[in-house]
Amino acid sequence: MYKKRGNIMGRISALTLGIMLAASCLTGFAEAASVSGDVNSDGKTDVTDIAVTAAHIKGIKALDKEAAARADVNGDGSINVADIANLAAHIKGIKALSENQTEPVRELKLGDKVSLIGGSHGKLVTMAGKVEGGMTGKFSAEYKVTDALSGKTELDFTSENSYNFAGLKKDGTLMLTRMAPEGGCEIYSYVPGKDKPSVIKLDNDVYRTYFDEQTESLYIEEETKLNRLTADGKLEEIVSFGEDEMLNGVDASGMTAALQGDAISKDLSKVSVISLADGKSLWETVSHDGGGIVFTQHNAVAYDNIIKDDKPIGALRCFDAKTGKKLGVYQPEGDVAKVYSSSMTDNCILQNSDSGDFMTVFNSTTGETASVDLGIKDMRLNGAYCIDENTWAVDVSTGLGMDSVSKTFIIRTDKLEFKKLPTGQDIETYEEFQLKTCGEALKAQREKADELEDKYGVTILIGDEVLNIELLGCGFSSTEQDMDEGYPEELDQTLDELDDWMSAYPEGFFEKFKTPENKNGYRILAVNDFYDNASNPIEMAGATDETKDYINVAFIRYQTDFKSVMDHETWHAVEDLVDEEYPFDEEAWDKLNPDDFKYMTGNYFAGDAPDKKYDKYLAGLPGRNENYENGYFIEDYSITNSKEDRATLIEFMYPSSTQSIYYTMDEEIEKYPHLKAKLDYLGEWSKQYFGYVYWDEMIKNKYVPAPGEALG
């Protein structure tokens, strides 16, 4: 605030003349008529704006209402010599004007093929890339740091590298990252006034970076840890986490981070908000698989992107970032695919799966939202960067491919009209997302399953418990809620057969599945049936997949060929297990097949049939023994892909029973040289992990004699 002095009008003329002479060759830039300082609305801020402002103050020619608002550059409600002094300082490059945007939205004309890639502290970071000599020619990109209000360039350089924005300091130092050609990551710091950047090389790949605008520290996320970059270019470890955990968001200035960990159900995972000072948990919540969690200046916002019956039922859950106190649960308009946030403000930008005709600003403290109409239909939000507490720069586009057009806008959140959102559905208490358990009617079966778990070192899910899990994009159903009278008895029989099946495997076999990556090991799911994402039944008897902490084998809860299905699926589990430590050699496996053979590329379960020309290689097992010399595959399902080829071969070895009604399989397999070669190859490969060929152990220790045959 300037104090009034006497004889202001007498001093303006001389002041104006001196400024005009000193700044006659200096010009600033403004992007819209509503911008503070562009008094005459000619698209730039220069000495002519000082002249018309001085004429207004002297009473020579009054400004209209809009021009007067632009002349009040310090926003004190009056136009006086202080505004002229600020204009002069801005034009001479001494001090940029403060933002005095009168409208909530103004467009920035960045130029053709110029993209907004970052921003902070009242500055924007842009990149304009080009390729000389066609698509395979030499690439180069011009990077600029400009003042968001005036458009004045503060840093400008061209590089042959393509960078990712990492951070922007108050002095205009631009921090960029890129993957190094020889591996690892490089961090570049471009300082205004210096010709070359400083470069820090890191050995490991960088997943994400987080910049603290307050302390100007750069945090770097690697595979299993979060580091801080020190002043001397070294990495200081802040917190480490397991391979089954991941960072879901980091608030560097608030020194907190969200660490997503164990699954609570197939839809929810536990999230711990941790302190970056000591790595200890401050409070906990949950995260939906389709959502995430971000941090604003004071708060944490968990967004739940849930669509049910083609309608969004997700919510924005707001917490105090330090204490975890829930501030509110709000229902947004439409789904929320991503949230852009900043430690400079409690406002954030919501992005829908398809941004549509407007964008949304959300206040995490009040639970209020404001729609922003940019005048663009069917637009997509590409990025949003907080410039200061009340200002965001957003990059949007419309159209596809060569017809795509990008535009950049400055949004003043303090000029928007906010309204309270309605209360949303809290997934922490929403019954649909809670962990499913067995009912009282299956109490005895659950106790029997517990006994088998202790006996064999596995996990067994029965009844509605299977509804907590999702494998390979498949869903399961359970008849527990609508069970008939015979269901518990059938499940009892299934568990008895499961006990008999597991007893055939060598002692300690299932314990081998417990590894650092799958700490809980082998898990069995007794399901009623399988269905796809569209809730259509799938004709499958079993499925195997690896999820966090488990290798899962799911099977139809009761079927006549139960043991062969479990042997088949268990080989899939074995292959996933062994492959982690001893990668399988597909090229060597292909050499065990006929020279003219290729596995099919279609979908067997969708009705695609294997090529009939390969029928000549089918062994004809089980049943009639035939095609000994030319039998490479058990049946037509074996030629769908290499994994099913191997699993089908193990399945028809009958390792869990070892004796068919037709013949003893270990003796019969000797008659098929190509099948035997494949089986021997799998035995030697898996032996590296188990220390033995497990189906040989089963045959030796669990042999069932033929009728009338004596043991020994």
Image (cartoon, rainbow, N blue to C red):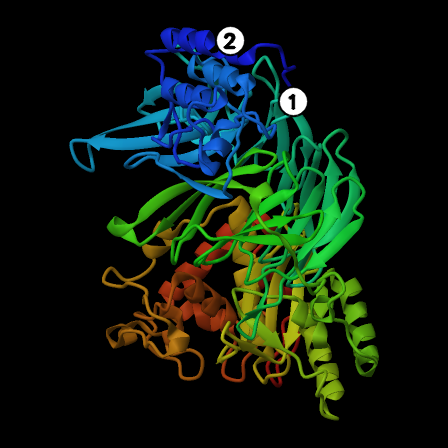
Q: Secondary structure at mark 2?
A: helix
| Residue 235 appears left or right of 407 | right
Residue type at tag 1: Thr
Give whichever of discs 1 and 2 has the lower sequence position: 2
Q: Position of residue 451 (x, y in %)?
A: 81, 69
**Count of numbered circles in the view:** 2
Specify the farthest residue to the left. Answer: 133
Front residue of 113 and 663 = 113
- Identify residue for label 2: 11
- Identify residue for label 1: 215
Q: Position of residue 464 (x, y in %)?
A: 71, 75
Q: Residues within 10 Å of mark 1 (few under 14, many from 20)?
A: few
Q: Quadrant of residue 508?
A: bottom right
Q: Residue at x 67, y 30 (%)?
A: 253
Residue 635 visible to the viewer: no
Image quadrant holding the C terminus, namely bottom right
Q: Disc 1 versus disc 2: distance between alpha carbons?
A: 44 Å
Q: Residue at x 36, y 18 (%)?
A: 27
Q: Position of residue 564 (x, y in %)?
A: 55, 75
| Residue 158 appears left or right of 661 | left
